[in-house]
Image: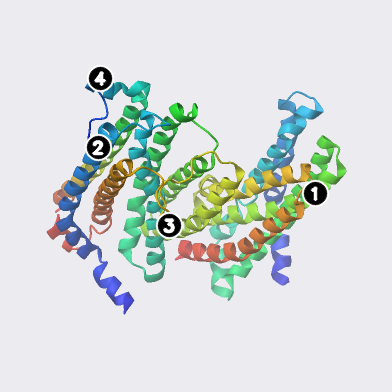
């Protein structure tokens, strides 16, 4: 039942045609939300009492670091789907997401270390969260290079999804162990269970920029998965209609 | 909440000395996003072109 | 038992495969004092980090060709079809590699730490840590090499080193624990716990990965 459902709705063909309908809406809505909330955050929110104006980097840093992990989780879900139900679309999504995840992690790392200069007085600290983000970045690069080294796409997909799953199991272990090793980073300001510890006037643009960034990254994933699908399904007849 | 946080545009760019960090990060994010979108758009166009030529 | 003996003989014949990693470990441990000022306290500062990194690297080399030869001559495919439990065969293979490479390296690390610190009890405590961690590292690199198989071991190492980092952190912490005389057995149990999970999980995953290669 589930299998039938997934196979029907997750065929690359339906995906491609369905996604095309929504792409423009998602893109324009999220880019306007992102630009608006970034301008709001950068120019209209009052200065932070402790960190001064450098706290404004939060509006660029937090969405990226949030997504850097979520994208890995998305890859892990896609890997499980691929290995259990052999859904081809999931395999395309894994390799479509990997470079984007690496880019987002790069943004999180670089913005974080630039933010560190005015607030901590140093651009790099061997602190728990920075280090685990760096490890995550290396893991993304490893995934990309693993997939790139096999010319047989199907084999590469299978190996990649195994590695993604193993890495996903390892992420909390890395986080815990690195936490244990050293910590300096401020603990997460927003959690789902506790009340947020920052002022609402600073919070709303943060939520906005996170949503906007999320939307933009979804758009990126859509385009890159389109590239994958056209590349890999080029022998199918329906591709002609699409192109 | 919606008041301009700075006295002038120059001050908004300078941000009490923190402007350079903030604007560098803004540039990094914008460059990354634009280049990623550009990269995939170009790739998509190339693929479509190749596909149409092979027909 | 028969399989165990067979794998043992196979590895024993390939002296490069088991002697190489041990020699590399030896060389790193000799090279370390040559790069620092020859004062006992200065030697001790970085000694244990070098020891763990040397263990990591020699285990990486040890796992380098664990499947490659069998894959190339087709015997890996044959055993996969023949045996009912491919995963247990892999765990036997890993065990033999650890027996011939991991144990000598642990002995060497005991000797080297005794030579550097001249503290017998400390060196004795290093020995079990080294034994367990070398087995963990070997398993992880076997996983990486199963992924990259015929694409060279650098790729395999690249994808597995992030997995090995938590173990390195635990090893570093356990040295601190030994030096301050706190909760040493806790660390041993933590590592043993990791090992017992890895010992079961890695051969299973590796068997699926190799099946994917051969399909």
State if disc 3 and disc 1 touch (CB < 8 Å): no
Neighbor class of circle 4 (other Cα within 10 Å; few <14, some 14-19, many 20+) is: few
Q: Chain of mark 4?
A: B
Q: Is residue B50 visible?
A: no
**B24 sits to left or right of C181:** left
Q: Is residue B8 visible?
A: yes
State if disc 2 and disc 1 touch (CB < 8 Å): no
Q: Give the residue displayed 35% in from the left and 53% down from the top.
A: A95
Q: Are marks 4 and 1 on the same chain?
A: no
Relative image position of residue A191 (x, y in whole percent):
42, 52
Q: Chain of mark 2?
A: A
Q: Is residue B17 above or below residue A181?
A: above
Q: Give the residue displayed 37% in from the left and 27% down from the top.
A: B21
Q: Give the residue displayed 56% in from the left and 51% down from the top.
A: A176
Q: Which residue is mark 2?
A: A40
Q: Secondary structure at mark 2?
A: helix
**C198 sits to left or right of A243:** right
Q: Which mark is residue A193?
A: 3
Q: Are marks 2 and 4 on the same chain?
A: no
Q: Secondary structure at mark 4?
A: helix
Mark pair 2, 4: CA separation: 17 Å
Q: Quadrant of residue A108?
A: top left
Neighbor class of circle 1 (other Cα within 10 Å; few <14, some 14-19, many 20+) is: some
Q: Which quarter of the rendered picture does the N terminus of chain C lie within?
A: bottom right
Q: Are marks 4 and 3 on the same chain?
A: no
Q: Which mark is residue B10?
A: 4
Q: Which residue is mark 1?
A: C125
Q: Nearer the viewer, residue C165 or C148?
A: C165
State if disc 1 and disc 4 touch (CB < 8 Å): no
């Amino acid at each position: 039942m589930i299998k039938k459902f997934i196979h029907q709705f997750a065929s690359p063909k339906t995906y491609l045609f369905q996604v095309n309908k929504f792409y423009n809406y998602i893109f324009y809505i999220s880019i306007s939300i992102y630009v608006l909330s970034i301008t709001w955050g950068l120019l209209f929110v009052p200065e932070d009492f402790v960190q001064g104006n450098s706290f404004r980097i939060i509006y660029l840093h937090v969405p990226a670091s949030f997504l850097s992990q979520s994208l890995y989780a998305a890859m892990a879900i896609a890997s499980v789907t691929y290995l259990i139900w052999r859904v081809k679309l999931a395999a395309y999504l894994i390799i479509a997401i990997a470079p984007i995840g690496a880019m987002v992690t790069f943004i999180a790392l670089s913005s974080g270390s630039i933010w560190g200069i005015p607030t901590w007085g140093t651009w790099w600290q061997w602190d728990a969260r920075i280090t685990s983000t760096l490890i995550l970045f290396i893991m993304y690069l490893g995934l990309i290079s693993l997939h790139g080294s096999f010319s047989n796409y199907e084999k590469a997909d299978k190996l990649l999804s195994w590695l993604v799953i193993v890495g996903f199991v390892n992420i909390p272990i890395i986080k815990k162990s690195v936490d244990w090793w050293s910590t300096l980073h401020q603990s997460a300001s927003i959690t789902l269970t506790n009340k947020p510890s920052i002022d609402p006037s600073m919070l709303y643009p943060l939520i906005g920029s996170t949503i906007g960034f999320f939307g933009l990254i979804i758009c990126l994933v859509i385009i890159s998965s389109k590239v994958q699908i056209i590349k890999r399904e080029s022998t199918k007849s329906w591709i002609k209609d699409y192109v | 909440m919606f008041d301009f946080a700075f006295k002038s545009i120059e001050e908004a760019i300078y941000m009490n000395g923190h402007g350079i960090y903030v604007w560098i990060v803004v540039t990094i994010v914008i460059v990354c996003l634009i280049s990623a979108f550009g990269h995939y758009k170009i790739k998509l166009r190339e693929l479509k072109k190749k596909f149409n030529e092979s027909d | 038992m028969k399989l165990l003996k067979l794998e043992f003989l196979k590895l024993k014949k390939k002296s490069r495969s088991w002697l190489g990693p041990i020699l590399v470990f030896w060389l790193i441990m000799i090279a370390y004092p040559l790069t620092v000022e020859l004062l006992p306290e200065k030697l001790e500062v970085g000694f244990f980090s070098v020891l763990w990194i040397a263990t990591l690297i020699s285990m990486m080399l040890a796992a380098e060709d664990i499947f490659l030869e069998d894959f190339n001559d087709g015997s890996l495919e044959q055993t996969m079809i023949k045996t009912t439990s491919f995963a247990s065969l892999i765990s036997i293979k890993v065990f033999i590699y650890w027996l011939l490479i991991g144990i000598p390296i642990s002995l060497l690390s005991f000797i080297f730490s005794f030579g550097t610190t001249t503290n017998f009890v400390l060196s004795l405590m290093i020995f079990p840590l080294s034994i367990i961690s070398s087995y963990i590292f070997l398993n992880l690199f076997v996983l990486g090499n199963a992924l990259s198989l015929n694409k060279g071991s650098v790729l395999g190492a690249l994808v597995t080193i992030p997995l090995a980092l938590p173990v390195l952190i635990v090893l570093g912490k356990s040295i601190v624990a030994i030096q301050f005389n706190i909760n040493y057995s806790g660390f041993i149990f933590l590592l043993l716990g990791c090992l017992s999970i890895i010992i079961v999980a890695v051969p299973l995953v590796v068997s699926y990965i190799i099946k994917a290669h051969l399909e």
